[in-house]
Amino acid sequence: MAIDGVVNYFGVPYNGNKKLSKLVSNINKNKTLLTLLKMSNINAIDRLGYNDHGPTHVRIVANHALKMLRILIKRGVQPNIVKNYNMKNEDAEVIVTLASVLHDIGHAIHRENHEMLSIVVALSLIDSLLNGIYNEEEKEIIKFEVLHAIYSHEPETRPLTIEAGVIKIADALDMEKGRARIPFKIGSINIHSTSAMAIEKVEILEGEKKPIKIVIIMSNPAGIFQVDELLKKKIKTSGIDAMIEVEARLIENGKEVVFKKYE
């Protein structure tokens, strides 16, 4: 991964959000952050033999999180930054994007207790990443909303905000072919690695019964392990579980057949 001369290293659709555009620009210029993301993968992949927890992962999580947040807003759900602090939907987009980028940064130190380590590392980065976007009071509010989302992204911790709930689920949705969020040893053949290769596609759609419909397309029934062992648990403790439905589909004879539904 090149650090110098990075162009569009990290990207999300802005949809006219100038604050988000400035944030992404700050992310792509921050060499310390880019280096730490590289280091996160060295610990996760090279030293532990696990799957990716670095640059590609955070980009996928940010795009998934923004898509879910925008669907919820479209369906009349008010983000907590709006409800509790009288700020704007565009600020909620900044929170989920920045939390996506920083939620696994603690892997640069160690995987164990990485959510707590991520908070420690993020504290040294957030102010510079928010430069030129917010005044002092707003920056502090955004900072601690981001830290809340980072802290809440593991299955056992229940988020207190819509934004943090979105991050939690988005993290689990990075599961397409070989990108399982349940860490598996690279090169080993077991249910973790087999299921990781079974997920062909993840789709985030606007639902009919509920605001968000998540569709998981599998080439092998083993893929349901990823859904049951992580995604399901994270949705249950996300705080936005009532707004989500999940449909797992299995490809049989070239056609997608509904394998399992979660409502």
Image (cartoon, grey):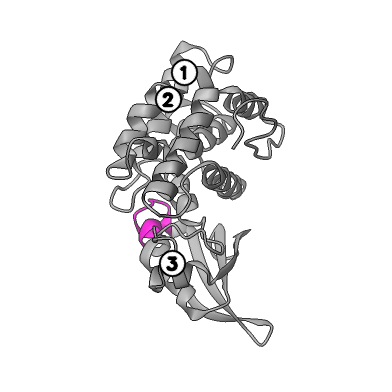
Residue 237 placement: quadrant: bottom left
User: Separation of disc 3 and disc 2 at Cα?
Assistant: 31 Å
The reply to whether the magenta stretch includes residue 235 is yes
Q: Do tag 3 and tag 2 residues touch (Cβ < 8 Å)?
A: no
Q: Earlier in the sequence, mark 2 or mark 1?
A: 1
Which residue is under mark 2? 143
Label 3 neighbourhood size at 10 Å, few (<14), some (14-19), many (20+)? many
Q: Residues within 10 Å of mark 1 (few under 14, many from 20)?
A: some
Q: Earlier in the sequence, mark 1 or mark 3?
A: 1
| Pointer 3 residue | 226
| Element on which disc 3 rests | helix
Quadrant for the N terminus in the image: top right
Residue at the image point whose x is 66% and y is 88% from the top:
253
Q: In which quadrant will I find the C terminus?
A: bottom left
From the image, tell me which residue sits under label 1: 127
Residue type at mark 2? Lys
Instruction: Residue 161: name its quadrant.
Output: top left
Task: Please state which amino acid type lies under the numbered disc 1.
Answer: Asp
Where residue 100 appears, as percent x and y from the top left, is 49, 40
